[in-house]
Image: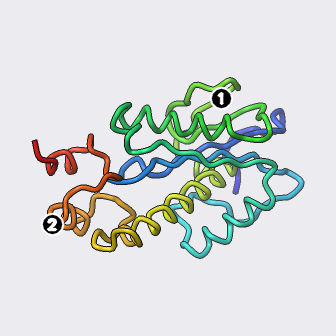
Amino acid sequence: MESLGFDFSEHKLTAGVDEVGRGPLVGNVVAAAVILDPENPIAGLADSKKLSEKKRDALYDEILEKALAWSVASASPAEIDELNILHATMLAMQRAVLDLSVKPEYVYVDGNRCPDLPYPSEPVVKGDSKVKEISAASILAKVVRDREMKVLDAQYPAYGFAKHKGYPTQEHFKALKLHGPLAEHRRSFRPVRELIPE
């Protein structure tokens, strides 16, 4: 994947950061940070949403094996309700970068703003399809969050979490109305809040 005008030559230890799960009504918002090894390239990196589950899983294993450093962090539904989804997302991204075992020289963050970091950083709109480090981070975050939804689905099969991953689908709305919100639901999100008794 081309870096589309982003020059990495001056920054050897470049981290990419992305998140998954801002839109769902349930579960954590998950962020990942990755520093790739230029000597150990990974073919096929792309925006995680454009890859099949099978391809994401294969790349996930390859990223863990080949990256110089990687980290996955999250913010909980309680933190999302307390801070709001934007600030909780920034917190998860900050945690992911600070948890890296290698300190980056520069950080590219997917989106239009950066969390508060002790390193030079730059937001990149649609970065998951422009910067390979962000693509790698998007894959880690997506695989981890999807697996969390499968665990939740096994605990609460009536909600269909394995299928819709917690996003506000008709199936999810129907289950919410029938069975009510779970502790893992984001109570500050209106479709959930409206179903909580006064």
In the image, residue 45 sits, relative to residue 20, either above or below, namely below
Decide: few, some or many residues near mark 2? Use Cα within 10 Å; few <14, some 14-19, many ≥20.
Answer: few
Residue at 78% in and 54% down: 67
Q: Position of residue 55 (x, y in %)?
A: 62, 72
Q: Amino acid at mark 2?
A: Leu
114 sits left or right of 120 in the view: left
Q: Position of residue 144 (x, y in %)?
A: 56, 59
| Mark found first going from the N terminus, 1 or 2 | 1
**Spatial CA span between label 1 and label 2:** 45 Å
> In what element is the residue under mark 1?
strand
Residue ID for mark 1: 121
> Which residue of the protein is positioned furthest toward the right in this rendering?
39
116 sits left or right of 105 in the view: left
Decide: few, some or many residues near mark 1? Use Cα within 10 Å; few <14, some 14-19, many ≥20.
Answer: many
- Specify the quadrant of the image occupied by residue 166: bottom left
Residue at 78% in and 50% down: 36
Q: Pick whichever, 159 or 127, lies toward us.
A: 159
Residue at 51% in and 34% down: 91
> Which residue of the protein is positioned furthest toward the left in this rendering?
198
Give the number of the disc on residue 178.
Answer: 2
> In what element is the residue under mark 2?
helix
Residue at 55% in and 29% down: 115
Give the number of the disc on residue 99.
Answer: none
In the image, residue 51 sits, relative to residue 91, either above or below, namely below
Q: Position of residue 51 (x, y in %)?
A: 56, 68
Quarter of the figure that contains the N terminus: bottom right
Asked if disc 1 and disc 2 are in contact, CB closer than 8 Å, the reply is no
Does the image show residue 16? yes
Quarter of the figure that contains the C terminus: top left
Q: Position of residue 128 (x, y in %)?
A: 58, 50
